[in-house]
Amino acid sequence: MWIFFEKPVLAKHARVYIRHLAKQLSVEVKGSGSGDGIELFPKQDALDNGQFGNAIRGPLGIHRAAGRRYWFYGAAYELEAQMAYLANLRRVTEQQVKGLVSTVPPDPPAEQPRRVEFHPDRPQFAILDYVQTRRRVGRNWIAQCPSCAAAGRDRAKDNLAVSVEEPWKYICWAGCTKEQIRSALGAPAPVLTR
């Protein structure tokens, strides 16, 4: 689903608008509940200077893997008809966005990860002492992977997943090892000798 705005709007306002619309339609949004749902773009409310948002496949282009064009429903499957269809679509006005955003209550404060007390005789590495979580998705906290960040990757700050129930369990979805993550934090894993 694509939503067209009359003029550019702030990403944070577009996200509020889209989340509200999804809720009204009883459509789950990924990252806002227990599991799967639609992906929401843009994924961030704002970006730092020099940062890029997530890449998306634009409409009407030819998908490289599938080798076929993806069309909008509602018009004949030819470029001229598709462009005419898009040109005539009603767009969301800035007033509509501002009106909706002003009536939507703010999200409740984000849940904070709980620190786990470890057995005092067995010191454990606690990743949550080193990273700041961004949100909770299902059974995991989401954060920026320190190893990816040190390499100039993970600009969306969502490659690292930390188990909510067992926060000593964590994984980088881009493939960084625990040793690489700990090394990037300046807390390398101890070397075990026999």
Image (cartoon, rainbow, N blue to C red):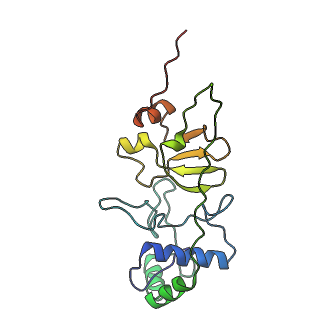
The vertical placement of 151 against 10, above or below, is: above
**Residue 185, relative to residue 155: is it above or below?**
above
Return the residue nearer the eye: 163 or 73.
Answer: 163
Work out which quarter of the rendered image holds the N terminus and state it. bottom right
Q: In terms of image quadrants, where is residue 10?
A: bottom left
Q: In the picture provided, is 137 more to the left or to the right than 98?
A: right
In the picture shown, does residue 80 fall above or below 167? below
Report the residue that reaches farthest toward the front. 120
Count of number-bearing discs: 0
**Frontmost residue, 28 versus 123:** 123
Residue drawn 59% across and 79% down? 105
Q: Position of residue 114 (x, y in %)?
A: 62, 49
Q: Nearer the viewer, residue 61 or 127?
A: 127
Q: Looking at this view, name the residue that lies furthest to the left.
A: 50
Quick check: 74 left or right of 53? right
Residue 99's x, y, as percent? 51, 89
**Residue 4 position within the rendered picture, expressed as x and y whole percent measured from the top left:** 47, 80
Horizontal arrangement in the rendering, residue 54 relative to residue 31 (left or right)? left
Q: Nearer the viewer, residue 75 or 28?
A: 28
Q: Quadrant of the C terminus?
A: top right
Q: Residue at x 54, y 66 (%)?
A: 40
Observer able to see residue 92: no
User: Which residue: 50% across, 61% down?
Assistant: 68
Q: Residue at x 56, y 64 (%)?
A: 39
- Is residue 133 toward the left or the right of residue 163 in the image? left
Q: List x then y, in percent, for residue 117.
A: 64, 38
Residue 4 visible in this rendered orientation of the protein: yes
